[in-house]
Image (spheres, rainbow, N blue to C red):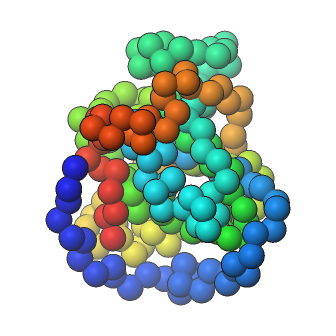
Amino acid sequence: MSHAASPPPPTVPSAIQSRQALAGQPSGQVEVATFASGCFWGTEHIFVKHFSGAGGLVKSTVGYTGGRGDSQNPSYKEVCSGATDHAEAVKLEFDPALVGYAELVEFFYRTHDPTTLNRQGGDRGTQYRSAIFTHTPEQLEIANRVTAEVQKAHFDDKGQKIVTRIEAAGPWWDAETYHQLYLFNNPDGYQCPTHRLHW
């Protein structure tokens, strides 16, 4: 799906502008970031397009997380029913020497609408909620800080409020094989229209 060219980005807070400069050499270390921003096909697709290879992304996996404790290893059909309260999410394994967690969080906000509760585009339900699942106290601090920066830079002047849930990562279940890298294997497949660069 083609989109009109985005306008030049507005001025952002200095904390985003002055993110730690990275060395640009692979470290061999891997950290994990987990995000939910609607249909996981599009969430994975846009992250992989922008961060694969030298961009620091080592591996991506789509799956289910954040739901009821008694919902173990749910199926896609069960998650889509809304009964499990799991979110469709992407788990990103990345090299922190090539891309920082703050940059991934900012990109997460840049590529969906975080102001719509339990909805992206025409997709509705708790499985499509906007959420950041943090894996360390440092990630929690960064996620909260970047959220505040993005709110001020991109939504305050519109009178909109970010409704993204930020919570500790819990149990994770990989989605069925056919969902993995879905839009790379099915380039004409459905992609939520909110999964694009918004600034």
Q: Quarter-wise, where is residue 99 in the image?
A: bottom right
Would residue 125 be visible to someone looking at this image?
Answer: yes
Name the quadrant of the C terminus. Answer: bottom left
Residue 93 sits above or below residue 121 on the image: below
> Which residue sits at x=24%, y=71%?
6
Count up the numbered dots.
0
Is 92 displayed left or right of 165 in the figure?
A: right
Q: Position of residue 68 (x, y in %)?
A: 61, 20
Would residue 117 be visible to someone looking at this image?
Answer: no
Name the one closer to the observer, 13 or 62: 62
Is 60 displayed left or right of 76 in the figure?
A: right
Q: Quarter-wise, where is residue 61 in the image?
A: top right
Residue 143 sits above or below residue 13 on the image: above
Q: Position of residue 44 (x, y in %)?
A: 48, 45
Q: Position of residue 143 (x, y in %)?
A: 61, 60
> Which residue sits at x=34%, y=63%?
197
Q: Position of residue 39 (x, y in %)?
A: 40, 36
Name the one closer to the observer, 123 or 188: 188
Is 112 displayed left or right of 108 in the figure?
A: left
> Which residue sits at x=28%, y=73%?
157
> Which residue sits at x=44%, y=47%?
45
Name the one closer to the observer, 44 or 86: 44
Q: Quarter-wise, where is residue 63 in the image?
A: top right
